[in-house]
Image: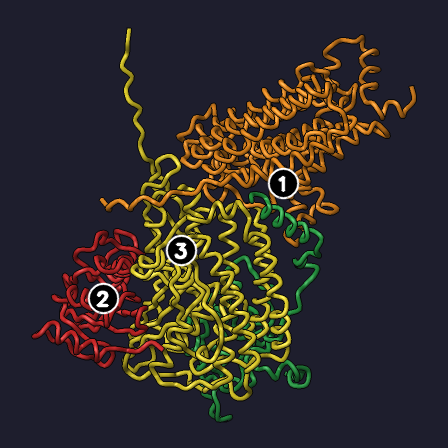
Amino acid sequence: MIGAGIVKGMAVTLRHLLRRPFTVQYPEERLPLPERFRGNELIWLVEKCTGCNTCAKACPHGVIQVETSAKLDENRYFVEKFEADMGLCIFCGLCVEACPFEALYLSREFEKATYRHEDMFRRRDDFINAQKNFSGYFYPYLDKERPKRLEGW
Amino acid sequence: MKEEAAPIKTETFMVNMGPQHPSTHGVFRMRLSLDGEVVVDVEPIFGYLHRGVEKLAEGRTWVQDVTLTDRLDYLASMSNNLAYVLAVEKLAGIAVPERAEHIRVIMAELSRIASHLMAVGSFLNDMGAATFTPLIYMFQEREKILDLFEMTCGQRMTFNYIRIGGVSCDLPEGFIPALTRFLGEMPRFIDEYDTYLEDNEILLARCVGVGVLPPDKAINASVSGPSLRGSGVRWDLRQADPYSIYDRLKFDIPTGKNGDVYDRYRVRMEEMRQSLRILGQSVRDLPGGDYRTKVPVTFRAPAGEAYAHLESPKGELGFYLVSDGSLSPYRFKIRAPSFINLGVLRDLLIGCKVADCVVTLGSLDIIMGEVDR
Amino acid sequence: MTRDISQNAAQRIAQRFPGLAAEAAPAGIVVPAESLLEIAAFLKENPDLALDYLAAITAVDYLDHFEVVYHMTSITHNHSLMLKVRLPGRENLALPSLTSLWQGADLQEREVYDLMGIAFSGHPNMKRVLLWDGFQGHPLRKDFIYEPS
Amino acid sequence: MSFWDYIKDLSNIARRVAEWTGGEWWVYGLLGLLALLLFLVPSLLALIWIERKVFGRLQVRYGPNRAGPFGLLQPVADAIKVMTKEDVAPARGDRLLFRLAPALAFMPAMAIFAAIPFTRNMAVNLDIGVLYIIAVGSLGVIAVFMAGWASNNKYSLLGAMRAVAQTVSYELPLVLSVLAIVLATGSLSLVKIVEYQTVPLLLLQPLTFFIFVVAALAELNRTPFDIMEADSEIVAGYHTEYSGMSFSLFYLAEYTHALAVSALIATMFLGGWKPDVGIPWLWLIVKIYLVFLVFSWIRGTLPRLRVDQLMGFAWKFLFPLALINILIVAIEVQALEGFPGWLALVNIPVAAIILIGMARLFRFGRVTAPARAPERG
């Protein structure tokens, strides 16, 4: 019969009318970020990096560039250049997984829009000075041990 | 004075529907020849989103190619990840831990629900629930699924989660309770949406008998997925050619009777219910243990070839990989279901009205990321 | 489980088309290009094989030859077959089109033509699908170099 | 005369001002226009806000809430945005018609209000009020067709063709349903129609009400009858090519029309300014908004019909229904010599039975099997 289905549908929408809105008023209200949230920033720990270039090889887009020079007195490499064009990054996390020394992390930052592409370029110093908001992605233990492990770095 | 009136001449006219059109689901274009409101001929034109994924993949390593598959069917990235990874595992003979298999199935089914929600929502939107009400209801549920994904792997759309040999990280602590809660409330929502529009007379009038795809034609035209099942063909790769742990799961394959737009819509709604059943079972049986067989960053698949396919939300998603034993695939072929399903579009549309075009297209559930690759 | 029927199919083809070399490749069978249409028709219509579903068509560039791969499935019997055709050389490649047997071949053959440059004779609408009409070259070939005009 | 009297009946103010200026006719006219604009402009803004808010809440979201308190200034913000936008006209279109159409669309919708009685005195007591409204109300389609034609766009033309077909079809049941009211009340004057309603006509003639609302929805081109601007099919129909201020004129015309039809329904079926307590014209405004809320609710819920089904619905369902309705009303009027209030008790079940019966008989047209695909040339 024409009409019964329409009336049922109208009742459903009427019920929704009385529900609390589902949406979040973004700048004021925020959804809790999951621990593993892959934000659009890389975190590089200069102390841990050996300059092995594995992350650069793992990156599908060639975002990361590493240059090293030998530090013969300390018997290790000095990472002269560690650059990443975050404008090209797709936040796949492959570099983080590849890093054998746990020197790379994704961050939980996400409000990183810029007006120019160049502003998304991160140089060595940017990485060192950056605020480090570690994401638990690939390092689930970070969730639990966050303060202990990371505050000193 | 009698004047012989010249007979009125009518002619068909051409309308380019797309590539910028509200309901062509991306940059898809239909060149319609119209006789008034009736479609006389239609030519689907696409490729506007062609990124050359198959060529790009040849230049990236096996591990990196997972990220490319994310960007095919961006509404069900997990299925794409899984299909590619299955093909690589078949090629290299990698065994996957039991826990990883379960996690994969959970993710694949969640993404099936998410994709079907989008498909149904935008389909109803095409039908002219022009204020997006059904679409937004569907979005609301999809949001919960995306939250689950985000919780697990940190991203909402391009997950890059399923890895060769397992999954990239284990389920987080709160995942199982959250999923259980979702499983608890989702059936109620599906029921509600069914009440909303299932037997709405306007919807029935618009859908029943429109875009009829007979089963023999569907098979002949290599249509797959809900569109094939809507035509009444019981063909679901999860049962026909079970991969992962699907052979151990109990679920039904919903099929339609007439193969019209309405049946395809119903099949999608039913499939969501079945996916919930699958999810319930795989969560119940989720074993502990390892979630990943370690595969080196410099993974090299042995020379050879493999074709693996799975039932993605859109249909049979297959990957045909040829390896020459190097770091990257020699040939990376994607059997994209949306692309091949489009082959029947012309037959479905001719003789329809303009309004049926968008509804039929919506019911085929194409996604341009996958069609154009 | 979908069974692979390469062996069975090779035997049957040998029976049906004596003197025709259908080799069993590591995966699937290889048939000569000239008799592709007949063999495909046979595979589709033979009630025991009944490969009614043409899942995928693709081509691989092996530099000295091209290999066109047809993935066929039988929905009736739930088995599958990988049918291959080898095309030596790099220029003026042509194969009979299977659109008369499977409508599903339509777009897929166009895609192979578009990206690999293998023309299918008898196809009703042999045009590029993904790339635009004036595009030079076929990008999935191994020797393709993109030169923006 | 007390202050209260002035508030209760704003026409007293007009009379006072007119006396003061010497009772010229044009003073009345200007005052009327002023009053109308004072009602119309805030109402339009409110309507847009209401509809967006209703959609928002139907869709489990907030709706506009940024501009001003509760987003009340959202329409103002929209207006500013729209006014600062470039107004593009298609190069190959008919410039004159293209520019004329939006103005022409707005005019008839506004002219309807001339005949709406806000109270007994706050009205132009037009003896042929109903006729006037129907005549003026259907003018809008000319503007629509003009816009579609002048845009030189195939979508626009499709939309315009649909609009004409639809309006012509739905005009019939609309007029016939009004006829039933005229039969019962014995007058074409809206003031008399309101005064007649000791029991609202909604209860006395539910069938008429149903026909009128459905046909009016179609006239307003709101879902499920919005095929002339079906955004998922023909982009935006007749106003595809319009931008900036000309687009917003169409947009406003649509809402003005909606407001006018709501006012008409409130007047003809819900008893207008009655019950005559408090401030009578506020009653009418409240009723108008209530009717519009229901319109928004319908629009927020339903998908749209296809063009042929739409016509089928008009000609095979609404039209016969309207005829039956007239027959019933005519018999009742003849037999009972008047239209007593207790008739509502009879008419509601009768209407329900007829509606259900007709609905059982009626089927939406289905497509015939698609023609065979022609060979590619």
Quarter of the picture holding the C terminus of chain D: top left
Which chain does the red colour mark? Answer: C
Please name the amino acid that badge 3 sits on. Gly
Quarter of the picture holding the N terminus of chain D: top right
In this orientation, which residue lies closer to the viewer: B5 or D16? Answer: B5
Residue sitting at 45 percent across and 77 percent down? B246
Report the residue marked by disc 3.
Answer: B259
**Marks 2 and 3, how far apart at CA:** 23 Å
Q: Is residue D358 above or below residue A111?
A: above
**Are the residues flagged by discs 3 and 1 in contact, CB closer than 8 Å?**
no
Which chain does the green colour mark? Answer: A
Q: Is residue B340 above or below residue C86?
A: above
Q: Is residue A83 visible?
A: no
Report the residue marked by disc 2.
Answer: C44
Callouts 1 and 2 in the same chain: no
Please name the amino acid that badge 1 sits on. Asp
In this orientation, which residue lies closer to the viewer: C147 or C43? Answer: C43
Indicate the colour of chain B. yellow
Q: What secondary structure is found at the residue carrying circle 3?
A: loop
Of the numbered discs in the image, which one, if any, rests on residue D78?
Answer: 1
